[in-house]
């Protein structure tokens, strides 16, 4: 239907007021990969640029931030019987290698993600042998195409936002030299893949996926790993809804149990014992 509207607009091509009306109609479809250039004529730009005039372009960022929060300790408790013990040496940065994989530049690329402590959501692309993934801030992709090089192939990385259902927004990797070489993944499928890469922590009435990763920090050359800072993330999903709880690693002590309020004020205690995280229910 979008293509039909575009064709009609081009054929009619009449007065500027008509073009403005067609532009407003087309904006409603929420496809940020399309740009209407209104001026002496009406055309489509293949080297598209997003514009702030497109309604709802920040909906996905808002959607993700509203479902995540950084927790501070709600107090401390003495250790009791642990509900779960997790080996952090096996869990560290496992969010880099999720089941979501694509072949790019002849190599296997793992697509993952992380939240930083400002609740910014990042997409990551990782190849075995790299020291760290290439990260892309989702908010940044709404304003500018990212770039990923795998072997000798260069890919543009973009985000096609769905304003009606943010979870159906798609991350797109397109070979700059061959537009047929393209990989896509929806935000929903990416989050499902991330969940599969986490460690399941089952409590009596709630179940979380636990992650432990080196933080992502914005720098002069873009987002990269901060080797001096780590975060725990506990994600609870209910259907298409998710709730992300971020806990700075330095907030989890060794001498006692730090208590945090999670989904529906559920009290969960965390204690770091060597390379093991102990999780306590209702401490």
Image (cartoon, rainbow, N blue to C red):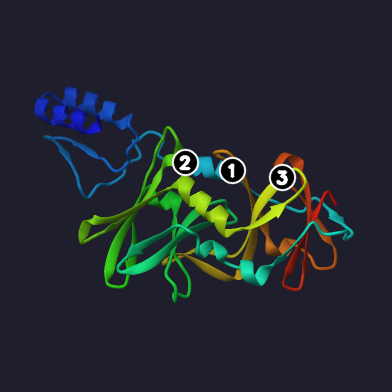
Residue 220 visible from this viewpoint:
yes
Q: Residue 195: which disc? A: none
Label 2 or label 1, whichever comes before in sequence order: 2
Q: Are marks 2 and 1 in contact (CB under 8 Å)?
A: no
> Mark 2 highlights which residue?
167
Under tag 1, what secondary structure?
A: strand
Label 3 or label 1, whichever comes before in sequence order: 3
Image quarter in which the N terminus is found: top left
| Residues at marks 2 and 1, CA–CA distance in whole angstroms | 11 Å
Q: Residue 206: which disc? A: 3
> Mark 1 highlights which residue?
242
Under tag 3, what secondary structure?
A: loop
Label 2 or label 3, whichever comes before in sequence order: 2
Res 104 quadrant in image: bottom left
Residue 272 horizontal/vertical position (percent): 76, 67
Around disc 2, counting alpha carbons within 10 Å, would you say few (fewer than 14), some (14 to 19), or many (20 or more)? many
| Residues at marks 3 and 1, CA–CA distance in whole angstroms | 13 Å
């Amino acid at each position: 239907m979008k293509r039909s509207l575009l064709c009609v607009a081009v054929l009619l091509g009449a007065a500027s007021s008509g073009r403005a009306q067609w532009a407003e109609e087309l904006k409603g479809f929420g496809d940020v990969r399309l740009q209407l250039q209104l001026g002496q004529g009406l055309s489509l730009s293949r080297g598209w640029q997003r514009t702030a005039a497109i309604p709802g372009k920040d909906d996905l960022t808002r959607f993700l931030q509203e479902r995540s929060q950084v927790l501070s300790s709600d107090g401390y408790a003495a250790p009791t019987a642990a509900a779960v013990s997790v080996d952090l040496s096996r869990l560290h940065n496992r969010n880099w290698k999720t089941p979501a994989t694509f072949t790019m530049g002849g190599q296997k690329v793992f697509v993952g993600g992380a939240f930083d402590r400002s609740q910014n959501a990042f997409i990551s692309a990782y190849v075995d042998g790299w020291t760290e993934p290439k990260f892309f801030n989702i908010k940044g992709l709404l304003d500018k195409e990212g770039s990923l090089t795998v072997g000798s192939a260069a890919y543009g990385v973009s985000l096609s936002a769905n304003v009606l259902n943010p979870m159906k927004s798609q991350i797109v990797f397109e070979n700059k030299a061959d537009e047929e070489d393209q990989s896509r993944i929806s935000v929903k499928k990416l989050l499902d893949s991330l969940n599969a890469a986490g460690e399941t922590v089952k409590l009596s009435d709630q179940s979380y996926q636990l992650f432990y990763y080196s933080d992502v920090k914005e720098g002069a050359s873009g987002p990269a790993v901060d080797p001096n800072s780590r975060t725990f993330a506990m994600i609870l999903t209910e259907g298409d809804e998710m709730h992300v709880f971020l806990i700075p690693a330095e907030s989890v002590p060794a001498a006692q149990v730090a208590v945090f309020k999670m989904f529906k004020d559920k009290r969960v205690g965390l204690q770091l014992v060597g390379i093991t995280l102990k999780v306590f229910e209702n401490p």
